[in-house]
Image (spheres, rainbow, N blue to C red):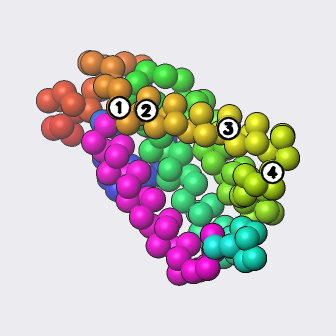
Amino acid sequence: MTLSDFFLSPNGRISRQEYWLGLLALMAITVFGAAVFDFDGLTSEGGKVRPPSLASTLWSLAFAWPSTAVSIKRFNDRDWPSWLGYALGAAMTAFVVANYYGYLLDPDVMDPVEKLIMVAAAIGFLWALVENGVQRGTQGANRYGADPLSSVATER
């Protein structure tokens, strides 16, 4: 699998190790860009959390698809439906956009609906992280391809 296939294609399966390496690389790049484009981004002014800048938001959105593609491939390895990865990507995109508009930033000023959304999102993201990052994939081939840990998969 090429690097562009790894980060841009939702097809195939990846192991837990590949998932963690991809996720950590994407997080490092996203944090680096956010620091470059909006160094004061998530600091508070007078006790109020500021939303990220447009440049920082666009940078984060640029990495939403690669993160989604990596998650989809990991869901594929677990033999879960691909739509879960797409739903995770949509939630991540909505979260980034909501932050830009000042929502879902500061628990001290959130209304009850925002708090409910934040708790649901946190549970969903945590579930996906445990499901993809801790649980072993389906042994042997499944409907998404060969087992990435099998000798056949490593010879490609």
Q: Which residue is mark 2?
A: 130
Q: Around disc 3, counting alpha carbons within 10 Å, would you say few (fewer than 14), some (14 to 19), or many (20 or more)? A: few
Under mark 2, the amino acid is Val
Q: Mark 3 or mark 4: name the one nearer the start of the chain.
A: 4
Instruction: Please state which of the two labelled residues, at mark 2 or mark 3, is closer to the viewer.
Output: 3
Pinpoint residue 95: horizontal percent, then vertical percent: 69, 51
Q: In x, y percent, where is residue 27? A: 45, 59
The x, y position of residue 144, in whole percent, is 41, 26
Task: Tell me the residue that label 3 is attached to.
Answer: 119
Tell me which segment is drawn in magenta: 16-42
**Cα distance between the residues tagged 2 and 3:** 16 Å
Q: CA distance from mark 4 to mark 1?
A: 32 Å
Can residue 54 be seen? no
Q: Which residue is mark 1?
A: 134
Q: CA distance from mark 1 to mark 2?
A: 5 Å
Q: Earlier in the sequence, mark 2 or mark 3?
A: 3
Task: Please report the residue visible at 50 percent of the width from the left and 53 percent of the height from the top.
Answer: 66
Q: CA distance from mark 3 to mark 4?
A: 12 Å
Comparing 137 with 116, the one in front is: 116
Residue marked by disc 4:
110
Residue ID at (73%, 77%): 45
Considering only order in the chain, which callout, 1 or 3, is on the residue closer to the N terminus?
3
| Dominant secondary structure, magenta | helix
